[in-house]
Amino acid sequence: MDIYSRYAPGWLVAPGESAELAEAFIASTIAGVGAAPGVLHADRGSSMTSKPVAQLLVDLGVVRSHSRPHVSDDNPYSEAQFKTLKYCPAFPQRFGSIHDARAFCAAFFDAYNHEHRHAALGLHTPASVYSGTAAQIRAHRTIVLDQAYVANPQRFARPPTPPRLPAIAWINQPTPEALIQTR
């Protein structure tokens, strides 16, 4: 997941977890996107800390970032997305098969990326923010709100403005002291 936009460029449902599967998934997702991220943040599970994944990221020039030991919610963006998935009204008690789980996730991630509007993203979709169209959409929203205000100023306490996009997103934001030391 791209933490700034909340866009999920890839997902995988598999019957098990392995270092080789994680390596192949990361490689195919990066190939699908067309560019490697600067940083890849992951939990400290054996697959994500494995030699195949570490070597792939070194080869691609991607910095590895891992959650702090014994901190299960160290990636709030991923945890929030997972909660959205699990609390989706259509999420079943059990999947009939792995194929059913994959079909559900295909529909879910398409809707999550292209229809789900996030309050933290100024009510934009992850795809809009990820692809860079959010600024144009926000500018259009500004025009529409300005027209609504001019036509009916009594409906508003003050001229309305569309919600802002976040300026930056962090996982484990460095302290000001740490940033000063790295300069």
Image (cartoon, rainbow, N blue to C red):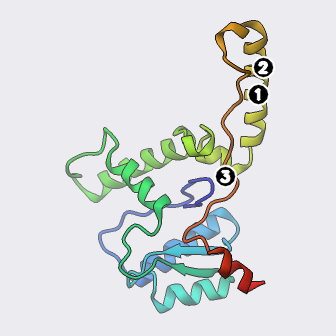
Check residue 130 in the rendering and tell me which mark sits there, or answer none.
3
Query: Marks 2 and 1: CB-CB under 8 Å?
Result: yes
Under mark 1, the amino acid is Thr
- Residue position for label 1: 142
Instruction: Please tell me which of labels 1 and 3 falls first in the chain.
Output: 3
Instruction: Please tell me which of labels 2 and 3 falls first in the chain.
Output: 3
Under mark 2, the amino acid is Asp
Residue 128 higher or lower than 160, as above or below? below
Q: Nearer the viewer, mark 2 or mark 3?
A: 2
Question: Which residue sits at x=43%, y=64%?
Answer: 12
- Compare residues 51 and 72 and report the one nearer the observer: 72
Question: Which residue sits at x=65%, y=63%?
Answer: 33
Q: Nearer the viewer, mark 1 or mark 3?
A: 1
x, y (%) of residue 181?
72, 86
Residue 122 higher or lower than 47, as above or below? above
x, y (%) of residue 54?
54, 88
- Compare residues 74 and 3 and report the one nearer the observer: 74
Query: Marks 1 and 3: CB-CB under 8 Å?
Result: no
Under mark 3, the amino acid is Tyr
x, y (%) of residue 86?
32, 50
x, y (%) of residue 165?
68, 45
Side (left or right) of 64 relative to 135: left
Of the 4 image quadrants, the one containing the N terminus is bottom right
**Quadrant of the image occupied by residue 18:** bottom left
Q: Secondary structure at mark 2?
A: helix
Check residue 146 in the rendering and tell me which mark sits there, or answer none.
2
